[in-house]
Image (cartoon, helix red, strand yellow):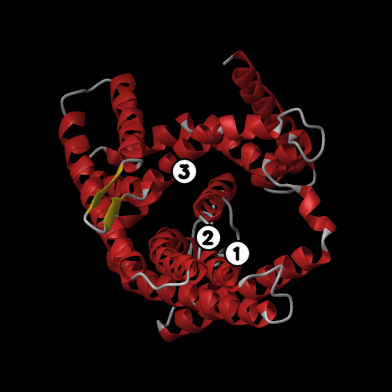
Amino acid sequence: MSITILYIAAAMAAGLLFNRFAKLISLPNVTGYLVAGLLIGPSVLNLIPKDGTEALNVLVTLALGFIAFTMGNEFRLSSLKKTGKQATVIAVFQAVTATLFVDIALIGLHFIIPEQLPLAAAITLGAIATATAPAATLMVIKQYKAEGPVTSVLLPVVALDDVVGLIVFAVSFGIAKALESGHIDMVSVLVNPLVEVFVSLVLGAVLGLLFTFIERFFHSRSKRMSISVGFVFLAVGLAMLEWKIGAVTVGFSSLLVCMMMGTVFCNLCDFSEELMDRMDRWTGPVMVLFFVISGAELQLEVFSKWQIVLIGLVFILVRSLGKITGAGVSSRFMKCEPTVQKYLGITLLPQAGVCLGMSQVAVSTM
């Protein structure tokens, strides 16, 4: 326990130190945190060894819960009336385009280096390509206090992107597992992903209603803040439950549960904006730890194999092309403002927490 606390202290100190360096050269805070994590992680200084990063994974899970809850704030009905249709079409089209581009490129690469890139891995990576990092996007926007047409479309697109990404990943990963095992299981390919999305949204809505009801009985800032944090913890904890009903696995996505809870709360509670603003301040240290730990998990030794480097480069380049092309075409189709058509695709390139979560699921299951 004591060593884990020391790891947390080291991660926080390193993150804040490199945040100052990042500001000196006009880089986003996120970059400083990731570099700090890389340097103190097992690949460089080993101040936080591999088992240390694994011990801190609970903080990563909770941080993703708070991020998703905050993203739910972007689904206010008043805002969605203006950008809802545009955001939905763009989110779906750019995510599917990125997946198709990466699938085609990596399946082609599979036939060149089949031992290093199995077909199941190529399909899984194609699904992971959908994910856009809500934490990185949100933190950069807040740091620079960005407002305008691009931001108003970007935030709901990023939130919806994770919904689309989870569905695409669940289906693609089901196909990948079927290829690995040698037989196609239609339940895991089609039924389980749809069940996961449905029950996650239902659980999030129920928690959001309960959260809104309970908050009204407390008036002090500290108590409302405590209840808010407690409900995010509760949502993340419940989302870890899983059980089987016959051949169907009933599981939850903590991202969808927390996002839906935040959406319901922000649309029903009349003081939600004030509370969400205070939540942003409280979760600042959690965000620092999240990005530092993410940086510490990067393993530099993988770059010693040229095949892995080639796969990574193809993935990055083709995914970027898919995101930019998909966002550009769909935003023009939806007649968005010229600045949105020009810049939205670039803002969708970051990958972090959701992508890491998908990768961890794939590694632990296959």
- In front: 366, or 307? 366
* Among the two numbered marks 2 and 3 on one chain, the one whose residue lies closer to the N terminus: 3
As drawn, 52 above or below 142 = above
Q: Position of residue 75 (x, y in %)?
A: 32, 56
What residue appears at the point 35 percent right and 64 percent down from the top-left corner? 188
Q: Position of residue 71 (x, y in %)?
A: 40, 50
* Among the two numbered marks 2 and 1 on one chain, the one whose residue lies closer to the N terminus: 2
Q: Are circles 2 and 1 on residues that touch, CB within 8 Å?
A: yes
Name, please, the residue furthest toward the top.
2
The residue pinned by badge 1 equals: 349
The residue pinned by badge 2 equals: 132
The residue pinned by badge 3 equals: 64
Bin the neighbour count of mark 3 within 10 Å (Cα to Cα): few under 14, some 14-19, many 20 and up. many
Q: What is the spatial separation of the Cα atoms under label 1 and label 3, in whole angstroms?
A: 18 Å
Q: Are circles 2 and 3 on residues that touch, CB within 8 Å?
A: no
Q: Is residue 178 visible from the viewing direction of this image? A: yes
Q: Is residue 338 visible from the viewing direction of this image? A: no
Q: Secondary structure at mark 1?
A: loop
Bin the neighbour count of mark 1 within 10 Å (Cα to Cα): few under 14, some 14-19, many 20 and up. many
What residue appears at the point 24 percent right and 53 percent down from the top-left corner? 199
Q: Is residue 78 left or right of residue 286?
A: left
Bin the neighbour count of mark 2 within 10 Å (Cα to Cα): few under 14, some 14-19, many 20 and up. many
